[in-house]
Amino acid sequence: MAAPEYVPVDTTLKPRTYTSPPRRTEPWRADRPGEVVDRGQPSGPMLGNQGPDIGYALRLAETVRDDLVLAEGEHADDVLAGVVEVAMKRAALFGRAPVIHDLTYALTIFGFLAEADEDLVAFRRPLFAEISHHHHYAERRRIADMVDGDLLRRPLDRIRSAGWRRNLGVDVSA
């Protein structure tokens, strides 16, 4: 640690440094209660998708707010809260942090980047209603779980051409 100028210092002394031992005597073990090794990340309903820095999707969502095409009764905060969950899921599937394309996928699947037909609006309006509020976590998870991981791995042009009913597994006769 540096000393003030008025403190006398013996200039013949070498500074102290730290050196680590050449090797550890014992191997590292995952013996803490929170370690996840044998069975991988837990999966199941309401557990989400773990990935690095997935919260960055919340920041990216603000950059697409002005691009949303909303129908009457839809709110940007609700839409972004729902599609961010899907974007986080896609990023986690690829083992990386979210990028803007993850949001583009999610917005395309639910038809928020172009004018949507009445059936799609009627389908998505109750799904996204009021989910921006923190106590609607279950509803946001339901939206993310509705979108299959295989769909999120497809090229975007195939998602666009397939149509929303096929992408979301909605009965065509409905």
Image (tube, rainbow, N blue to C red):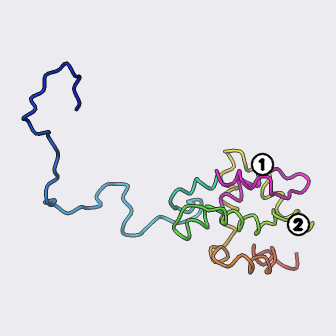
Task: In this rendered view, identify the residue nearer to me: 7 or 100.
Answer: 7
Q: Residue beneath label 2, please?
A: 116
Q: Residue 4 location, x and y as percent?
A: 23, 23
Of the 4 image quadrants, the one containing the N terminus is top left
Q: Furthest-left residue in view?
A: 12
Q: Residue 146 location, x and y as percent?
A: 69, 68
Q: Furthest-top residue in view?
A: 6
Q: Residues within 10 Å of mark 2 (few under 14, many from 20)?
A: some
Q: CA distance from mark 2 to mark 1?
A: 20 Å
Q: Residue beneath label 1, please?
A: 130
Q: Which residue is depicted at the point 56% across and 57% down?
A: 54
Say left or right for 126 vs 23.
right
Q: Which residue is depicted at the point 77% across and 55% down?
A: 79
Q: Look at the image and give the residue range highlighted in magenta.
A: 59-85
Of the 4 image quadrants, the one containing the C terminus is bottom right
Q: Which residue is depicted at the point 75% across and 64% down?
A: 107
Describe the element under mark 1 as helix, strand or loop: loop
